[in-house]
């Protein structure tokens, strides 16, 4: 069992154990650089943060309108319930995205372990 040949950002050697026939871990494998870039790009395009920011502003505006008397309390209460539903939906999307990413990582680890058993 070897160690990754990659160099960390701090200049030190990567300590990740790699499977037989592999010289690099996932994070340092030059052949997987496009995949890493794609995955990082997906994270950067996450719409959750923008949506949450918009919702927070709308909720703050709604609260201010209720407090200063310019919004009907009943309608504001219903709107707040709907905002809570949207927040839960965004959270569910985030959890599903994270679960998919974890499944991909687990698959990669299982492949490494499979290589160790046969090698």
Image: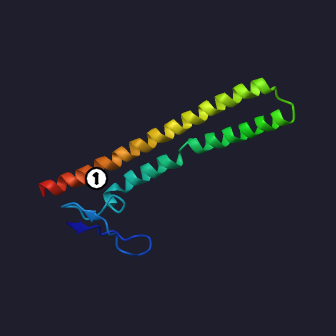
Query: What x and y, as percent, mark residue 33?
Result: 37, 57
List the single residue furthest toward the right.
Answer: 69
Classed neighbour count for the residue bearing mark 1: other residues with Cα under 10 Å, few (<14), some (14–19), many (≥20) = some
Q: Is residue 117 above or below residue 69?
A: below
Task: State the residue at coordinates (22%, 68%).
Answer: 2
Task: State the residue at coordinates (34%, 55%).
Answer: 32
Q: Is residue 62 left or right of residue 107?
A: right
Task: State the residue at coordinates (62%, 43%).
Answer: 50
Q: Quadrant of residue 58?
A: top right
Comparing 76 with 50, the one in front is 76
For disc 1, the marked residue is: 109
Q: In which quadrant will I find the C terminus?
A: bottom left
List the single residue furthest toward the bottom.
Answer: 11
Query: What x and y, as percent, mark residue 117?
Result: 15, 55
Q: Is residue 88 above or below residue 116?
A: above
Task: State the residue at coordinates (19%, 51%).
Answer: 114
Query: What x and y, as percent, mark residue 35?
Result: 38, 51
Comparing 21 with 58, the one in front is 58
Comparing 78 with 39, the one in front is 78
């Amino acid at each position: 069992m070897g160690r990754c040949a990659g160099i960390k950002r701090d200049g030190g050697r990567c300590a990740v154990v790699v499977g037989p026939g592999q010289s690099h871990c996932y994070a340092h494998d030059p052949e997987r650089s496009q995949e890493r870039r794609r995955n990082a790009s997906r994270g950067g395009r996450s719409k959750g943060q923008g949506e949450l920011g918009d919702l927070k502003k709308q909720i703050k505006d709604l609260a201010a309108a209720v407090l200063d008397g310019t919004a009907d309390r009943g309608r504001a209460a219903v709107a707040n319930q709907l905002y809570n539903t949207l927040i839960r939906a965004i959270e569910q999307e985030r959890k599903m995205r994270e679960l998919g990413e974890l499944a991909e990582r687990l698959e990669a680890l299982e492949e490494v372990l499979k290589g160790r058993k046969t090698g």
